[in-house]
Image (spheres, rainbow, N blue to C red):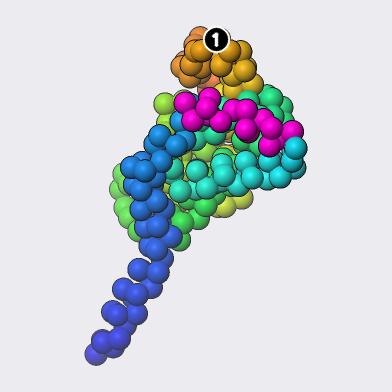
Amino acid sequence: MTNPSHGTESKAALAARLLPLSGIALAAVLGAVFLKDSLSFDALRENREALLAFRDSYYGLTVVSFVMAYVVIVGFSLPGATIATLTGGFLFATFPGALFNVMGATLGATLIFLAARWGLGARLGAKLQESDGKIKAIKDGITENQWSMLFLIRLVPAVPFFVANLLPAFLDVPLRRFVISTFFGIIPGAVVYTSVGAGLGEVFARGESPDLGIIFEPHVLLPLLGLAALAALPIVLKMLGRGKTL
């Protein structure tokens, strides 16, 4: 006979697991509604002198505050991640601005990853592992090439950042691999946008807006695609090796 309290406990446990992910989803919706104008290029332009003055007076505090703000923006999927990256370059130059940007983005991405894995990832991963046929084959293929796949989704500009945070959580990727691949995988794109932010002083002086499409320019996009191809090389070699043994 089934214990009547078992179902209630299971529902309560599921609700507890989904609470962090639900909180992130709610924050993302509220942020999209109420913060879209606060975390914008115009807001940065209007407050640039105050930000520079605060940085010059309290550099260490500015660094800590900036990284924490970046973590919150990414961790709760708030609008303004690109503006935050530009701000990192504007305040701290390309280096160490790129390092601060990568640190904040990695920590924020890790929060989403942990919330998703805690809420749904473990259950979904177990179901995929127990499944048969094509679904199981896809899951095993991704697991076998985890490092390559993780770097691929970070290096290809067409993959949305939040997708690259959620997908590994649903595929039972170890936390260590996720953090390492995120940190190093986002460096190329972060350096590009941070360098754009480092030149915002001149952009402001001309009354213009930055060219955020620079990452799709051939001289930037082609090296990124080259890195993506390098990340995909182990997968291709394994496929070719299997073809020879068949």
- The residue where tag 1 is placed is 206
Q: Residue at x 48, y 26 (%)?
A: 41
81 sits left or right of 57 in the view: left
Q: Residue 226, relative to residue 121: is it above or below?
A: above
Q: Quarter-wise, where is residue 15 in the image?
A: bottom left
Q: Residues within 10 Å of mark 1 (few under 14, many from 20)?
A: few
Out of 67 and 42, give the one closest to the viewer. Answer: 42
Q: What residue type is labelled 1?
A: Arg
Out of 59 and 47, give the one closest to the viewer. Answer: 47
Q: Residue 11, relative to residue 140: is it above or below?
A: below
Magenta stretch: residue 44 in it? yes
Secondary element type, mark 1: helix
Numbered-mark total: 1
Q: Position of residue 199 (x, y in %)?
A: 62, 17
User: Would residue 64 be seen by someone viewing this image from the given angle?
Assistant: yes
Q: Residue 59, relative to residue 212: is it above or below?
A: below
Q: Which residue is drawn at 45% across and 48% down?
A: 76
Q: Where is residue 237 in the image (x, y as percent from the top left)?
A: 53, 28
Q: Where is residue 138 in the image (x, y as percent from the top left)?
A: 38, 42
The magenta region covers 42-56
Q: Which residue is drawn at 59% across and 19% down?
A: 200
Q: Which residue is drawn at 56% across and 31% down?
A: 47
Q: Is the magenta stretch mostly helix, strand or loop?
A: helix
Magenta stretch: residue 94 in it? no
Q: Residue 22, relative to residue 243: is it above or below?
A: below
Out of 122 and 99, give the one closest to the viewer. Answer: 99
19 sits left or right of 207 in the view: left
Q: Position of residue 106 (x, y in %)?
A: 58, 43
